[in-house]
Amino acid sequence: MKHFLLLAGMMAWTLSAQITLDQNDMSSVGDNIPRKSDTMTVLTGPGGSGPNQTWNFTATSNHVVSEITSVVSVASTPNANQFGNSNMAMTNDNASYLYFNKSAQSFTTQGFSGDLLGSGIINAVFNPDLTLHQFPRTFGSSFNDSYVIDVIVPGAAINPLISQIRFKRSSMVHDTTDAWGQIITPQGTYDVLRIYTTDNYTDSIWALPIFPPTWSLVSTSSSATSSYSWVGKGGKLAIAEMSFDTLGAPKIFKWTELNGIGVGLEEANIDDLRISPNPCENKITVSVDAEQIGQAYYVTDFLGKQILEGAISKEQEPIKVDQLSPGNYTLRIGTKYCRFIRT
């Protein structure tokens, strides 16, 4: 009898917990997604695969950093013309960007752009695009994909006698949805699918000296990486991600801090303040209720460091932000807050 009751309970839970992902669960332009990374994770591994799993990842080390991933239009980025097939871009610093295309069939990435070596902008276009999701994604879904990155960069940042460096990566990726269940992070509990991804790649590097100006192959090496991600309904990005060091031990555990998408969670007060314009340049105006007049406001950066503070004096309160560096910030009044971008 006990076994029957246990089985009945598991079946009832299964009906509500197993999910299917589609394009509506991915990011959209205008999203600002708070995330944290435990860069020296104390977690021992990714847990089990298969149906009806529970992953408890609430333990963290003292090496946690915060960031906000902003989803912006391709046209607003400095090198939009290099990524014409993309319909959104993501950035953590408003300087480097990852480019994506979202459709009813898939979610793909077209490459990245940024000053990666401190020697100028590098546009690394994936050829072909790299598939991150095929829709609908369900437990047991899997696919293979390949991509090539081939870029030429200035060589002076590496060696003053080198004119240019060519870097090429050829990669084969295998993606499988190997589990479903509930994940518990420091933020909350979520119904998720778990995705296991392996990337087998070969890197080749060529150098073009100032003299003689002849390309020569410097090195070729092959390696593989693996990672896990836990993706939920309405999660925009992965609810959590785990990457590994060269010995196969967990290295970095990253999770999102979106509210209102977890199991049994109430909608929180994120974006409960009304501000304009957003993004902004020199000033924002926050609209508050009469009972909030007299309350203190605080502006913090993406690391949680307090940058500004003051008091609300009227229902349409202007706040000067021209002294802030371009980036992502949070405005808080009492228990309500809103994120904004200073351009």
Image: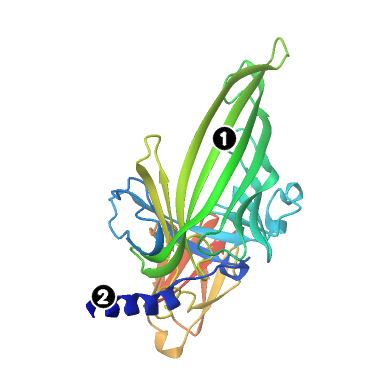
**What's the mark number on residue 27?**
none
Residue at 44% in and 58% down: 302
- Which class describes the residues within 10 Å of circle 2: few (<14), some (14-19), or many (20+)? few
Q: From the viewer's perspective, is residue 261 above or below residue 53?
A: below
**Position of residue 276 measured from the top left corner of the image (x, y, whole percent):** 58, 74
In this figure, what is the number of numbered marks?
2
Q: Residue flagged by tag 2: what amino acid is it? A: His
Residue at 35% in and 75% down: 10
Q: Nearer the viewer, residue 167 or 211?
A: 167
Residue at 48% in and 83% down: 288
Residue 216 sits in quarter: top right
- Label 2's element? helix
**Position of residue 329 measured from the top left corner of the image (x, y, whole percent):** 48, 62
Quadrant including the C terminus: bottom right
Residue at the far bottom in the pictured view: 290
**Position of residue 211 measured from the top left corner of the image (x, y, whole percent):** 70, 10
**What's the mark number on residue 3?**
2
